[in-house]
């Protein structure tokens, strides 16, 4: 199975792009084929439209979201690369979760209301950046930009996730190249790639 990389940052020359490039480079060195989704370049529409709202009885899934579901179904390793903005994910990634991890695909509710996860057996590496130093982000801000994704979103669907965090990511420095290289290696080891 090819790993799936989901990239959610509009900047082409920032910390997330350093991590992306390093992940792609290390996969290339290992001759590992992969699928790559750049939500901004693919102009993903993060707005959940009424016809897609499953709680209202609608079951429409856009062709783009359907393709992403097929990519997720076809892998057991997912890599997310995104910044933490306002102690949360970028809106485009939140919309991705809303539109792609749908009831019937990623989970379902039993008649009792208890959820059943459908994406068990999958692992995700979350490569995240924040302007705050890592210690401050985790201790004082509570690491919510990652916990909501790792536990409350992916975990709800059965995906086990681990965070790889770059703090103080305000300006790119040469030292960040080495940091990105090491972080990419750790994340790929976690996924056994």
Image (tube, rainbow, N blue to C red):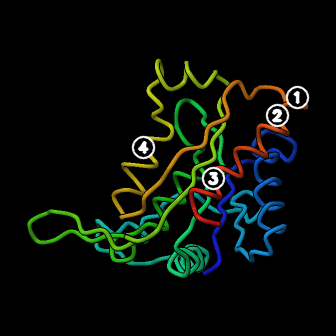
SS at circle 2: helix
2 or 3: tag closer to the N-terminus: 2
Q: Which mark is residue 187?
A: 3
Q: Nearer the viewer, mark 2 or mark 4?
A: 2
Label 1 environment density (alpha carbons within 10 Å; few <14, some 14–19, many ≥20)? few
Image point (46%, 68%), residue name: 122
Could you give the CA–CA distance between mark 4 and mark 1, rounded to whole angstroms? 29 Å
Please report contact status of discs 1 and 2: CB closer than 8 Å, yes or no: yes
**Helix, strand or loop at mark 3:** helix
Residue nearer the viewer, 100 or 192: 192
Give whichever of discs 4 and 1 has the lower sequence position: 4
Q: Residue at x 76, y 48 (%)?
A: 19
Question: Is mark 2 in CB contact (under 8 Å) with mark 3?
Answer: no
Q: Secondary structure at mark 4?
A: helix
Mark 2 vs mark 4: which is more N-terminal? 4
Q: Position of residue 123 (x, y in %)?
A: 49, 63
The residue to which callout 4 is attached is: 148
Q: CA distance from mark 2 to mark 3?
A: 16 Å
Label 2 vs label 4: CA separation? Answer: 26 Å
Can you say whether 2 is above or below 109 in the image? below
x and y percentages locating residue 3 in the rendered image: 63, 71
Which residue is outermost to the left?
112
Q: Name the mark on residue 136.
A: none
Q: How many marks?
A: 4
- Where in the figure is residue 72, as x and y percent of width and height? 53, 74
Looking at marks 3 and 4 on the same chain, the residue that comes earlier in the sequence is marked by 4
In the drawing, what numbered circle is on residue 176? 2
Residue 191, quarter of the rendered image: bottom right
**Residue 157 falls in image quadrant:** bottom left
């Amino acid at each position: 199975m090819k790993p799936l990389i989901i990239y959610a940052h509009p900047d082409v020359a920032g910390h997330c792009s350093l991590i992306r490039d390093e992940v792609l480079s290390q996969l290339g060195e290992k001759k590992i084929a992969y699928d790559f989704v750049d939500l901004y370049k693919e102009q993903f529409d993060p707005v959940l439209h009424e016809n897609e709202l499953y709680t209202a009885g609608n079951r429409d899934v856009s062709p783009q979201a359907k393709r992403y579901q097929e990519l997720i179904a076809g892998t057991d390793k997912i890599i997310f690369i995104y910044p933490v903005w306002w102690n949360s994910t970028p809106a485009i990634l939140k919309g991705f979760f809303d539109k792609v991890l749908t009831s019937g695909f990623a989970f379902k509710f039993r008649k009792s209301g208890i959820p059943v996860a459908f994406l068990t057996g999958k692992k995700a590496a979350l490569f995240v950046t924040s302007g705050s130093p890592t210690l401050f982000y985790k201790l004082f801000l509570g690491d919510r930009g990652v916990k909501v994704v790792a536990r409350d979103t992916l975990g709800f669907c059965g995906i086990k996730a681990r965070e790889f965090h770059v703090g103080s990511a305000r300006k790119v420095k040469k030292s960040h190249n080495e940091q990105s290289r090491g972080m990419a290696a750790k994340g790929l080891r976690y996924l056994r790639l």
